[in-house]
Image (tube, grey):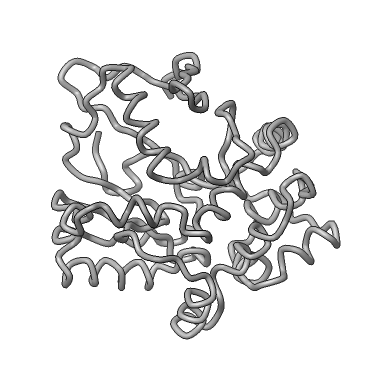
Amino acid sequence: MQELPPKKIFTVQECPSYAYVYPTAKEKQPTFLLLHGFPSYGNTDKPAAFEEYAFSKMSSHIARILDHERTQVIGYFSALVFVSVPYSPPHPFDLGALNALTKDAVGYEKYGYMSYFNETDASDINSVLPLSLVYPDKPELHKTELCSRGKIKEWVEARKTAPLPRWESQEEREARIKLFEKGGWTGSTNWYKSVIRNIDADAESKISPTNFAITKPVIFMGGDMDYLTRPELMAHLAEQGKQEDWLPNVEFKTVTGGSHWLMLEQPGFRYFGLTC
């Protein structure tokens, strides 16, 4: 595997500093913009105010970084790939309604953990205990101990742990623990607090609905053992996007034996039917 270049730090004017890795693309080759999700946080700033986690703010920060690197990523996109978490146009977020909807669709609430992250002071979270549940050895623990309301709180208070998954080494787990011991859970939980409070609603209301459509090819990737983002719900959303014309060229791919962490379990784009 090719060694990555040194990490860069870029401070957006009057905004947070972002840490990232930028391997220069080979001549005439496109640049892939990879944006991670919860709970991967390294040396990027972690503001205490959840208002700073508005998507409208963070997307403008990413655009400034691309300008800083003089990288025209957008112009090179031939397709967009959403791994484990699909795309849908912005809409008012109602946690209670979503839990009721998913319970009716798949038999259990999928977003119970969000209530815990919303109500809990991040400084009270032990850095080790949630990680063993977020990255468990058995994907089914996401369903029984993370998605169900109140279960993650019981897990943490009982100081439960789970064995490492087959794809994570002890060295990698210790590195994650050190990151959270240094930065805490403020950044991670603030993403959820901002979404639950619909802090992007005003900015989104000023965007024409036609601009939420993605006309380029889109791929949804979902593991058949993903209990956080059920593959049948991703497939349903893809079909809805086709019918309502906000994803006219979407395709859904199921990864057999994959859980929520596909990129960690099966590294390498060839596993996802992509070429680069």
- Residue at coordinates 35% horizontally, 64% vertically from top-left? 91
Picture coordinates of residue 27, whole percent (x, y): 18, 15
**For the image shown, how many numbered marks are present on the structure?**
0
- Residue at coordinates 52% horizontally, 83% vertically from top-left? 107
- Quadrant for the N terminus in the image: top left
Q: Is residue 162 left or right of residue 39?
A: right
The picture quadrant where one finds residue 111 is bottom right
Picture coordinates of residue 229, whole percent (x, y): 46, 64
- Quadrant for the C terminus in the image: top left
Picture coordinates of residue 103, whole percent (x, y): 51, 81
Residue extending farthest right: 158
- Residue at coordinates 39% horizontally, 31% vertically from top-left? 61
- Residue at coordinates 70% horizontally, 38% vertically from top-left? 184
- In the image, 111 versus 59, the foreground residue is 59
Q: Is residue 246 left or right of residue 181?
A: left
Compared with residue 181, is residue 203 higher up or lower down, i.e. above or below?
Answer: below
Picture coordinates of residue 271, whole percent (x, y): 35, 47
Compared with residue 24, is residue 259 higher up or lower down, i.e. above or below?
Answer: below
Q: Is residue 102 left or right of residue 64?
A: right
Q: Is residue 242 left or right of residue 176?
A: left
